[in-house]
């Protein structure tokens, strides 16, 4: 009967040891997963901020492009008006002689 008591004690101690090891492993895994989730949440937040900044920069660039397109259109209209004032309408008048004097 003594060997049965000893076997029961060894079994209980082994069970408690295994349960403790499993509990510690689960706790470690849980902590690791929480840390990973926290890091991932920070990265997602930074990505959202970066995308927001890039969207703002893109909108600003598109606004500048539109301003430049409008200015280019106005300059083209002014150029046409100047050509029309010169009387030719096709382009700027050219001097009769293309000879240049060099000093």
Image: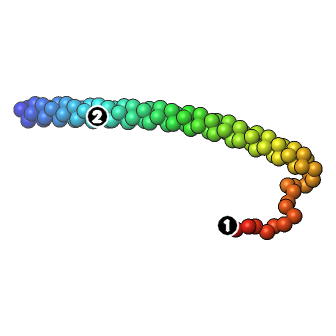
Q: Which mark is residue 18?
A: none
- Could you say which quadrant of the image residue 73 lies in? top right
The one nearer the camera, 63 or 98, is: 98
Image quadrant where one finds the N terminus: top left
Vertical order, 42 against 75 (above or below): above
- Residue 65 is left or right of residue 89, and the answer is left
What residue is disc 1 on? 103
Q: Position of residue 43 (x, y in %)?
A: 44, 36
Q: Residues within 10 Å of mark 1 (few under 14, many from 20)?
A: few
Q: Residue at x 67, y 67 (%)?
A: 103
- Residue 54 is left or right of residue 86, and the answer is left
Vertical order, 99 against 15 (above or below): below
What residue is disc 2 on? 28
The one nearer the camera, 45 or 53, is: 53
- Could you say which quadrant of the image residue 13 lies in? top left
Q: Residue furthest front?
A: 103
Element marked by disc 2: helix
Vertical order, 12 against 77 (above or below): above
Q: Residue at x 25, y 33 (%)?
A: 24
**Of the residues under marks 1 and 2, which one precedes in the sequence?**
2
- Residue 71 is left or right of residue 86, and the answer is left
The one nearer the camera, 75 or 28, is: 75
Element marked by disc 1: loop
**Residue 29 visible, this orientation:** yes
Question: Depth-wise, is mark 1 or mark 2 nearer the camera?
Answer: 1
**Residue 15 visible, this orientation:** no
Q: How is the image coloured?
A: rainbow
CA distance separating discs 1 and 2? 89 Å
Q: Residue at x 54, y 34 (%)?
A: 53
């Amino acid at each position: 009967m003594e060997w049965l008591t000893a076997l029961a004690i060894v079994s209980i101690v082994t069970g408690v040891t295994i349960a403790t090891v499993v509990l510690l492993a689960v706790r470690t895994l849980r902590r690791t997963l929480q840390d990973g989730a926290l890091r991932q949440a920070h990265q997602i937040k930074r990505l959202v901020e970066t995308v927001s900044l890039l969207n703002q920069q893109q909108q600003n660039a598109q606004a500048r492009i539109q301003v430049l397109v409008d200015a280019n259109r106005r300059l083209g209209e002014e150029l046409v008006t100047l050509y029309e004032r010169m009387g030719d309408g096709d382009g700027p008048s050219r001097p009769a002689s293309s000879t240049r004097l060099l000093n």
